[in-house]
Amino acid sequence: MQLAKRMGELGTESAFEVLARAKALEAKGRSIINLGIGQPDFPTPSHIVEAGRKALADGHHGYTPSNGILPLRETVSAHLRERYGVEVNPDDVVIVPGGKVTMAFAMLMFGEPGAEILYPDPGFPIYRSMIAFSGATPVPYPLPESLGFGMSADDVLARITERTRLIILNSPGNPTGGVVAPDEVRKLAAGLVRWPEVVVMSDEIYSRLIYGNAEHFSLLNLPELRSRLILLDGWSKTYAMTGWRLGFGVWPSGLAELATRLAINTHSCVNAATQYAGIAALTGPQDAVATMHAAFAERRDVVVEELNRIAGIRCASPGGAFYAFPNISGTGFDCRTLQDRLLEEAGVAAIAGTSFGGFGEGYIRLSYANSVENIRLAIARIADWLGSNRKPVAD
Ligand code: PLP
């Protein structure tokens, strides 16, 4: 058999690989605390589950329009009006099976050999993977720890060339929890005036998981970018709905039709019951969201405090998402070795920073979508393990 060459370009998410190794160790009787996987550890709120169940009982068993049922697209539009004070035409909203699909469609729409697509590093590994799969050249821009892992407009603008088609932004960010400063976004928008052909995809899937003084600044708030903005958001993280597969994209006028055509050619539509559950999520009581948010905020403080007690580790307080991205360079271990040995010898699943790009060396990602008790225990295991295995660090 002769596979298409582009299949060799597809990457993966190490979180799934580490999860499989953790499960295999558990099957052998080992105790593993999983701070590797990035999904809320809460059940979907019951009124949302009930709405999905009712939709099935009411007979919503068939195909729906490929871009999603109108009541859901209208609900998304009303939700965005309420959150950001902006008008979004429901016809520019495309409902997809998870945030990832908006991402994939954007790369397929703009990526081809000869094109360049800019993406954050450290960043969600699927960006690089799908850019390369599309045939385009992935161009990473760094997210420095010194900027709280937010992007610097100058770093992004300096990498734009005549070949740049698309820039990916992600705030709050995976794997760092970094939140971009609104002034940097405005500066980027001002610099993009010179590059009118360049499109921006803003991945705001963690936009409602934001803590302390951090603020989420949606790119929807910049009218000057609206005609070339693809907004990626969804239900997975906010409503603990990762397994339902539901997300939405807001597309520039004209592009929603192309995204819908991609949907027709791939998944046809999101399953009907899930779409009704999505309406219930956005229009129903939000107290479960507040409860989950409060739990994540508490855990964030615990993770940061406990990690900073360990000699050789320095952890900035993340402004959003549910990840901490401690700097481990003072331990003397490279991140991959630390990931492997923490899993096998300390019983803690964490992800090496380089799984998120070359600029991730010197860091590991810990997901705090786990109980405070488990987080404390995991960090105590890391401290104990480092206590007995610490390497001398050269100055
Ligand atoms: N964007 C980022 C930055 C993510 O971390 C994830 C999931 O981990 C997604 C998008 C995809 O979310 P979904 O599960 O809705 O496809």
Image: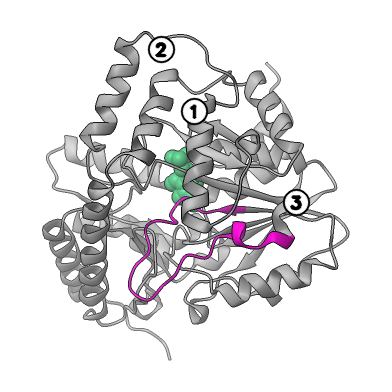
C-alpha distance separating marks 1 and 3: 24 Å
Q: Which image quarter holds the C terminus?
A: bottom left
Which residue was labeled with disc 2?
Answer: 60
Decide whether residue 203 is among the magenta residues.
yes
Identify the amino acid type marked 1.
Pro
Q: Which mark is residue 71?
A: 1
State if disc 3 and disc 2 touch (CB < 8 Å). Answer: no
Identify the amino acid type marked 3.
Ser
Q: Nearer the viewer, mark 1 or mark 3?
A: 1
Mark earlier in primary sequence (1, 3): 1
Mark earlier in primary sequence (2, 3): 2
Q: Nearer the viewer, mark 1 or mark 2?
A: 1
Q: Residues within 10 Å of mark 2 (few under 14, many from 20)?
A: some
Q: Residues within 10 Å of mark 3 (few under 14, many from 20)?
A: few
Residue found at the far bottom of this picture: 395
**In the structure shown, which secondary structural element does the residue marked by tag 3 occupy?**
helix
Q: Position of residue 277 (x, y in %)?
A: 36, 29
C-alpha distance separating marks 2 and 3: 35 Å
Decide whether residue 101 is among the magenta residues.
no
C-alpha distance separating marks 1 and 2: 14 Å
220 relative to 223 in the view: left or right = left
Identify the amino acid type marked 2.
His
Q: Which residues are magenta?
A: 202-224
State if disc 3 and disc 1 touch (CB < 8 Å). Answer: no
Q: Which mark is residue 244?
A: none
Q: Which mark is residue 227?
A: 3
Some atom of ligand 1 lies within 8 Å of the CB belonging to the residue at label 3: no
Q: Nearer the viewer, residue 94 or 392?
A: 94
